[in-house]
Image (tube, grey):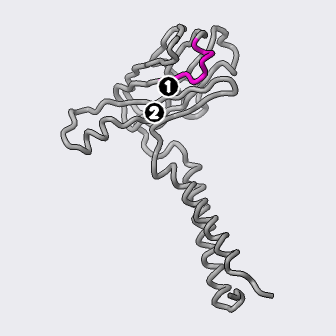
Amino acid sequence: MKRHPIRYLIVLLGCLAAADLAAAPIKKGGSDCLVGTDFYIVHFNAFQPPAKIPTGAREKRQALQRFCQRLPRTGTTYFGIDFIDRDVRSLPISLSVVEEREEDGSAMKTLKTVPSQLYPHGVAELKVDFDHPGRYALIIQFGEETGLSDDRLRIPLTVGLGGDSTPWLKVAAIFSLLAFFTMVIFFFVRFKNGEVAT
């Protein structure tokens, strides 16, 4: 029975594409966040001013960098929040940033609170001073009824902890690369033993 090498090549290319897709978010990093619940979607990013005035071109580029949920250092941080759904522009919205316990994610301390108000242009800004590394969360409450979980959006943040906020992507990338190299070895062993016919 003849085996066609084109089928093996298709599988190899599929594994390689999967590995590249899994590794892409790790290589590029995230500068924008799009998060939401079943009812609300927001786009946000964070900006941390540099500790010193940038001089070189590279430092100037880094000074303009926007972050998502993983903030590299402590200090003053500015959040920009865009409410995607136009309907929420007529809803009162409150914002808060809380420090969370690492064990269960419960709130330990509130760093900043913006009382409930309307955002008719769909944009909110928030300035927070993080004085030590840790795990935090940006909480967005839509409407006045604070007891409804569907109206509450929690965005987890890590500040000054390093590492990656999406370890499952690394696992997926490693698994895809292992699958790719396994198929390469499988293909060449079969080819060497004469089991793949041209």
Judged left or right of residue 39, residue 69 is left
Q: Residue at x 57, y 13 (%)?
A: 89
Q: Residue at x 42, y 30 (%)?
A: 46
Q: Secondary structure at mark 1?
A: strand
Query: In front here: 180 or 77?
Result: 180
Numbered label attached to residue 134: 2
Return the x and y of residue 177 as percentages of the image width and height: 57, 65
Q: Secondary structure at mark 2?
A: strand
Badge 2: how crowded within 10 Å, few (<14), some, or many (20+)? some
Indicate yes or no whether the magenta region holds residue 86.
Answer: yes
Question: Where is the N terminus found, in terms of image quarters?
Answer: bottom right
Q: Which residue is mark 1?
A: 99
Kind of residue indicated by mark 1 = Glu
Badge 1: how crowded within 10 Å, few (<14), some, or many (20+)? many
Q: Residue furthest left?
A: 55
Q: Are marks 2 and 1 in contact (CB under 8 Å)?
A: yes
Q: How far is mark 2 from mark 1, CA to CA?
A: 7 Å
Judged left or right of residue 99, residue 160 is left
User: Mark 2 or 1 closer to N-term?
Assistant: 1
Return the x and y of residue 191 as percentages of the image width and height: 65, 87
Residue 61: quarter of image: top left
Residue segment shown in magenta: 81-89
Q: Residue at x 60, y 55 (%)?
A: 172
Q: Residue at x 52, y 17 (%)?
A: 122
